[in-house]
Amino acid sequence: MRRPGVPRRRRRIVLRWLLGAVLLIAVLVLGAGLAATLLIDPNSFRPQVEAAAARATGGTLTLRGPIHIVWGLPLRLEADDLAFSGPGEVVRAQVGRVAARIAVLPLLTGALDIVRLDLLHPDVRLHPGMGTVSVSPAAAPPAPPSAVPGPAGGAARLTIGAVHVRGGRVTWRGTEIQVPRFDAIAAAPGADLVLSGEALCAGRKLTLSGESGPVERLLDRAGAPPWPVQFVVQGEGARLAVRGTLAAPVGRGAYALQVDAAATDLAAFAPLLPVAPPKLHDMSLSARLTDGGGAPPTLSAVTLHVAGLDLGALLPGLVLTRADVAAPDLRRPAQADVVATLNGAALNVHGTAGPLAGTALPLTLTLTAATPPLLEASAGVTLAWAPPHPAVRGTLAVARLDLDALLAALPAPPPLPAGAPGAAPPLSPRPARLIPDQPIDFAALRRADADLQISVASLLTGGGTYSNVTGHLALQDGRLALDPFAGQSPGGPLDGRLAIDASVPAPPVALVLHAPALSLAPLAQALGHPGALTGTAAVQADLKAAGDSPHALAASLTGQASLTASDAEIDDALLAALMGDVMKAARLPAKALIGLGRTRLSCLDLRLDAHDGVVNVASLLLDSPKLMMQGNGTVDLGPETLNLHLRPMLRVGPGIVVPVRVGGALREPKAQADTGAAGRAALLGALAGALGAQRAPPVPPTPCPAAP
């Protein structure tokens, strides 16, 4: 028969042994810690720690401060002043203090269990402009083991329970981002991390939340399943969400990520972007980014929606009302539907882009601008991003282009700062030159190559309509050729060719134009008198020049040009403004040219022959019912001087011709009569008055020479 007190006494004995064992282990641990503190210097392991970090990350870890071990339960390991530089110095970091709390008992079995890891005042600098680092297989560092070596040479288990960052700072593109708090906490050893944190960027708060895989798998480059990641970054009016998997995040494995973004205001992310973000009303983006180990990564399932995007910084007055882009993947064309306004004029773009094959991107676009109709065009081109500059090839078909209205809708470009390249010189009361010496930006021709077949069904410019305009534009290494171009002008057919070679310092320019009946209205508009000159003229030109400014081109002008018109009309006010000084010098009544309407020119003929900027006026004839004028002479476009001999004659009265010499500067021509001829004209006029002579009948019109 059992005695009743025996089981209880046995339990007490077992509890005493267990308590004694625990106390013994605690004493042993404390004793071992005390002995290790006295006999082991943790700073002696500095080279081994730095070498292990280099093998694991490919970067450089420098332990510049002391390492301390505080023995207890748990064990505390502290290190001050750490510096890390990633491969190629794309990432550089400094940490004021690292404190790790390590469980003691797992160390007895060769396991490293970091209960908590604290990073105080880390300073991370990112350099995206330095590019990626390429590591060849031969030069790649050997892959580290997937765990920490154990005491017996086997593999040890590594776990991290929590990571806490306090007082951090990240510098990106010169912008400093404060990170007051970041936490990554695992519910159990080996479990996923729960992420949370906040940042301050340009005075705006950003919050981070999400989950990621266990920290212990970060350095495992082989044999581990994909590392999951899911986080959301939110700011004022903006949200970015990323979810997916990464294989060996510290290594060079594959990844598959789903990226979703939405924003009504990008101001919170402005310091993170390469350029200042524009104002918008609504934006959403969704895309899947995958990488199978090759380059470039695959972008698929792309959808983009934008509404109310102000692009005034790109082009004043341009607002993207709505834009929708959808691309299943880069192997198939992307569809685009865009509605915009330019200073109130509606723009609509529909088309496809892609597929992306190599470095070439085919584009098929339909562009319309309505209310009023300014532009209707379609294009089928291929963009090639081959160095050193892009190239475009294909066709451009314009159904309608109202160039006058389109230029009126475009805002004037802002003036360049004083002293900037291409800026106009400071204004003076009377500039010395009439032809500007401001440099022409021929460098734009060296920034791209092109091979385009162009056709314009209807072109409105200068108050006239040109139709069926065709041309072949070729641009290669700065050498532009529009050869040939042809079309139907308001008065008749025209054809010609244009060549510019911007590959040399003083670009040569050549123009050949043949137009039997070219409208004179654009000429009047170019002179600042729209509508003052109408009719058509036969224009022939074969001109060459070289230079980097309008004045340099004019000073080297060589070739022939002619203009002949027999049905032109000129506004009387413009005729008086052009001929007033000549009539005054000839002592003829200038008011005879002033009327309330228009004057028909029975002949306007001008023949020019230029050589190195010296233009020989071989023939000048202007004949109207009121006035006939003939002349010749020279114009030197280099110094901008005149030496013309004109012979004006009123078609009413005695028909006296008084020669006039026009000289001086092109900006301020001076007209004076030939004194001998003027005296003879006065004597004949007095004699005719004394004899009571009647007015001579009008001189018949001079036949207009045939166009060359």
Image (tube, helix red, strand yellow):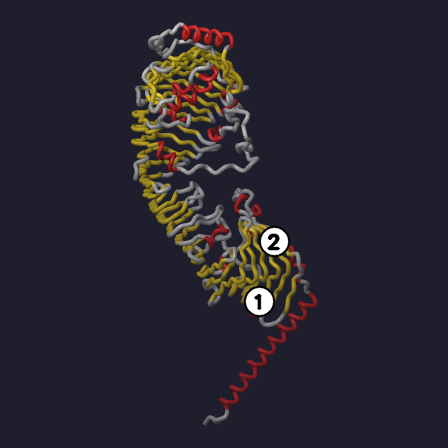
Q: Secondary structure at mark 1?
A: strand
Residue 614 seen in the figure: no
Query: On screen, 421 above or below 655?
Result: below
Name the residue located 41 percent from the left edge and 48 percent from the top edge.
290
Left-right relation of 519 to 668? left
Name the residue located 43 percent from the left edge and 6 percent from the top edge.
687
Q: Give whichever of 131, 564 is nearer the camera.
A: 564
Q: Secondary structure at mark 2?
A: strand
Residue 495 picture quarter: top left
Residue 676 in percent (x, y) is at 51, 7
Label 1: how many residues lie within 10 Å, few (<14), some (14-19) or many (20+)?
Answer: many
Q: Circle 2 sits on which residue?
A: 61
Residue 425 in percent (x, y) is at 55, 32
Q: Circle 1 sits on which residue?
A: 101
Q: Amino acid at mark 2?
A: Leu
Query: How many angstroms separate mark 2 from mark 1 (CA)?
Result: 21 Å
